[in-house]
Amino acid sequence: MKARKVAAQYAAYTWYQENHKNQKSQSEAVRFAKENWTAFLSVADEGWGRLLIRIASERAKQRGRQRRNRHSCLAS
């Protein structure tokens, strides 16, 4: 995914959460971000997008390590 698109989706997601505080549904915020990210392209910074992608990939690596460690403990 391109960095500016990621940044725009994050901007849309955070905007939705800030402006719809009474609605606690995270899935609604995600759906809004996926459908309306193009409206936020003008405020999307490519550097923020690259940072978000890097954070997401590090979290995925950590989850993979945790799963492997959990499975190795079960095998003992």
Image (tube, rainbow, N blue to C red):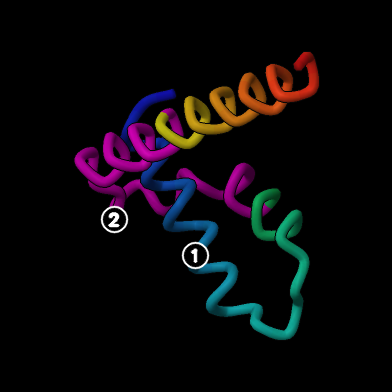
- Residue 48 point in image, percent of width and height: 26, 46
Residue type highlighted by circle 2 = Val
Q: Residue at point 40% right, 36% down? A: 5
**Secondary structure under badge 1?**
helix
Which marked residue is nearer to the observer: mark 2 or mark 1? 1
Above or below, 57 relative to 26: above
Q: Quadrant of residue 51?
A: top left
Q: How crowded is mark 2: few (under 14 residues within 10 Å), some or many (20 or more)?
A: few
Disc 2 on helix, strand or loop?
helix
Q: Which of 30 and 52 is in front in this view?
A: 52
What residue would you read off at disc 1?
14
Report the front residue among 64 and 4. 64
Position of the C terminus by quadrant: top right
The residue at the point 75 percent across, 74 percent down is 24
Residue range corresponding to the magenta coloring = 32-57
Q: Does the magenta stretch include residue 35?
A: yes
Q: In this view, does 41 lie to the left or right of 66?
A: left
Circle number at residue 38: none
- Res. 21 image quadrant: bottom right
Query: Badge 2 is on which residue?
Result: 43
Q: Residues within 10 Å of mark 1 (few under 14, many from 20)?
A: some
Compute the Cα span from label 2 to label 1.
13 Å
Whether 47 is drawn above or below 30: the answer is above
- Picture residue at 71% right of the left edge, 60% below the top: 26
Given the current orientation, which residue lies at the most extreme left position? 47
Q: Residue at x 61, y 43 (%)?
A: 34
